[in-house]
């Protein structure tokens, strides 16, 4: 496995930028665009099917489209290229650059108090980097390819 490809996919914290909903080249954005394209002008049909089928789920179509529009618009180029659009206060990006380490698991200070993550993300960060240390970055990367990012 190409280490540079792994680095392009995974942020220094270990989370997958490639699978993030905000990633411009990610599957979530790609499939959202495709679904929007396939739905076309479905709104009047949603109203018709609500009546025709007596199905209340069609009432929620505008909300569904709102979420789909949001996913389709996202445009982050990943943590290695720009400031994270979701965790704007992330301390890992500037820190790993200053320290010159590709990933936190390689850092002699891990686990540190510089991330600025909330409790959930901090726990995930510790767990992820523990897995990388135990299995190696290549095996961890393979795992990220077959699992959803949001579990
Ligand atoms: S940098 Fe942040 S917003 Fe951008 S793809 Fe990575 S996790 Fe998502
Ligand atoms: S000091 Fe902390 S945030 Fe910075 S690279 Fe090391 S483990 Fe990551």
Image (cartoon, rainbow, N blue to C red):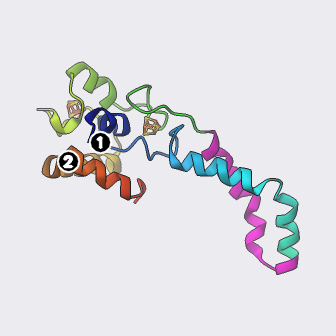
Q: Residue at x 52, y 39 (%)?
A: 25
Q: Is residue 57 magenta?
A: yes
Among the 4 quarters of the image, the one containing residue 8: top left
- Quadrant for residue 16, please give it: top left
- Across and down, in percent, residue 49 comes to 84, 72
- Where is the N terminus found, in terms of image quarters? top left
- Residue behind mark 2: 132
Q: Quadrant of ligand 1?
A: top left
Determine crowd level at label 1: few under 14, some 14-19, many 20+ residues with C-alpha closer than 10 A.
many
Residue 4: in sight, yes or no?
yes
- Residues drawn in magenta: 52-73
Which numbered disc, 1 or 2, marks the residue that appears first in the sequence?
1
Real-space CA distance between mark 1 and mark 2, rounded to the nearest whole angstrom: 8 Å
Asked whether the beta carbons under mark 1 and mark 2 sit within 8 Å of each other, the answer is yes
Q: Nearer the viewer, residue 7 or 64?
A: 7
Is the magenta region chiefly helix, strand or loop? helix
Name the residue: 13% across, 51% down: 134
> What residue sits right under mark 1 in the picture?
14
Q: Secondary structure at mark 2?
A: helix
């Amino acid at each position: 496995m190409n280490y540079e490809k792994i680095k392009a996919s995974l942020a220094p914290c270990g989370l997958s930028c490639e699978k993030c909903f905000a990633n411009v080249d990610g599957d979530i954005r790609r499939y959202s665009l495709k679904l929007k394209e396939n739905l076309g002008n479905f709104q009047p049909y949603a109203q018709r099917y609500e009546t025709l089928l007596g199905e209340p789920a069609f009432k929620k179509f505008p909300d569904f489209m709102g979420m789909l529009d949001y996913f389709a618009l996202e445009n982050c180029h990943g943590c290695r290229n720009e400031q994270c659009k979701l965790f704007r206060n992330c301390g890992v990006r500037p820190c790993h650059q200053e320290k010159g380490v590709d990933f936190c698991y390689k850092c002699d200070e891990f686990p540190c108090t510089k991330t600025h993550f909330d409790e959930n993300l901090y726990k995930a960060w510790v767990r992820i980097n523990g897995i990388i240390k135990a299995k190696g970055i290549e095996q961890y990367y393979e795992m990220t390819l077959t699992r959803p990012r949001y579990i």
